[in-house]
Structures are given as structure tokens and as C-alpha cells.
Image (tube, rainbow, N blue to C red):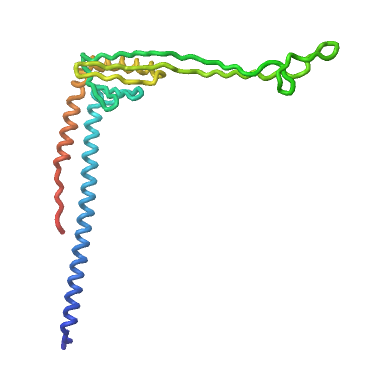
Amino acid sequence: METAIGPRERINIAAKRVDDAKESYEKRVKEALTAAEAAKDRYERRVELCRRGVEDASAPYDGQVMTVGPIVLYGNRVEYNGETLQLDNSLDISISTSGNVYSETKVSGGGPSVGGAIVGGVLAGEAGAIVGGTKKVTTSTETHDARALYVSFVSDEGSMVASVDPKLEHEARDLAAKAKYLTRTLEKRKGLVQEAVDKAKEQLDVVCHDVVYTDDA
């Protein structure tokens, strides 16, 4: 014979069932959120990988070539302090310098002394020896670099003037020469990478539009 269950016990049983159902629901929600976050991370990694693929494919055309101080030269443009000029046949690059390097020498001390005071010298003995020491002569040389180096860029698109450390003059001239070469080979390099860039962009487009479906268990 079944034991009779009173109203209070029935309420307690119902409340426990509600708590169990709530706990089970919250567990499933947490698991679903964790799975969704993991899927999102995988998706973002795939997108980033494909974007890098596009950049790598395009690098011979527009990748970074060199930097000189604040100037950054790319395969198709030059940047300085947030400004950008495209490489084209109208771009002219000039380098100008001013000032020079000079040295300043300071000499202190010298002369005979007795007890720290400079005197004309005291003769003693038949040989007429000088009594007293000679102060130490101190020489110091300071080199001052008063040079300035400017790299100017002028094209139909605009202009900019970059101030560069004068010690980087050789590198600045190298940058100007490389920019000329890159301008002359611009279209050729673009044609060489176009097919690879198109394929990489197609792959990126596929990944960006990829939709992952998950079954509700």
C-alpha cells in the first residue's frame, strides 16, 4: 500500500523538480555558450589566417620595404607621421642638409705651483733646481652636431617634409633610390601578384561567409 503524501510534501517535490529543471537548463545554456565561443574563436582564427594570406600574396607589390627614422616605405606608397603618398611617376623625392659638425676644446690648469699657488719658481742649490710641482693640465673636447636632414616628397597627390636624424643620411638616400625603383616597377609587380591575390581574396570571402550549424541535443 502506497504511503499517502501530504500537500507540503507535494509542494517540496514540485519545488525540487523545478530546481532540477532550472539547473539542467542553466547547464545546457552554459555548455551552449562555451561551444559558441569556441566556434567564434575558430572562425576568427580562420579569417585572420586568410587575411594574412592576402597580405602575403600582395607583399611584393605593397608590403613594407624599409624604414628610415619616421619614414616608412612600402612597395606602392610612402608614409610619414600618419600622412601617405602613393608612388607614381609624379612623385619627386629630394634630400637636403644644413649645418655641420664641430668640436670645442677646453684646456684648464698648468704652470708651476707650491701648495696649490702658482708662482714664478724658486731656485735652490747650485744646479738651480725648481722647488714646487707643476699643476696638471686637463683637456676636454666636446663634439657638437648642428646638422639637419630633411627628406621632401612632392607629387600630384600632395607633399610632405620629413625631419630625419642627420646620421641617417646614407639610409635616406637609399630610400629615395629604392622609391624610384619601386615606382618604375609598380605595374609589373602588381601584375605578377594579381592572380595570387585574387585566389587569396576568394578564400577569405568563402571563410567570411561560412556558417556553422550545430544540432540542439
Q: Quadrant of the N terminus?
A: bottom left
Residue displayed at 22% across by 57% down: 31
Front one among 165 and 55: 165
Asked if residue 55 lies left or right of residue 145, the reply is left
Residue at the far top: name it: 127
Front one among 148 and 193: 148
Q: Quadrant of the C terminus?
A: bottom left
Residue displayed at 15% across by 38% down: 206
In the displayed structure, 189 sits above or below 22; it is above
Front one among 163 and 93: 163
Asked if residue 205 lies left or right of residue 52, the reply is left
- Which quadrant would residue 195 be assigned to in this image? top left
- Where residue 81 sits: x, y (%)? 29, 26
Q: Exactly how many numbered labels are in the figure?
A: 0
- Where residue 198 sits: x, y (%)? 16, 29
- Where residue 135 sits: x, y (%)? 69, 19
Residue displayed at 25% across by 13% down: 92
Residue at the far bottom: name it: 1
In the displayed structure, 212 sits above or below 142; it is below
Residue displayed at 21% across by 19% down: 158
- Where residue 115 sits: x, y (%)? 74, 23
- Which quadrant would residue 14 be assigned to in this image? bottom left
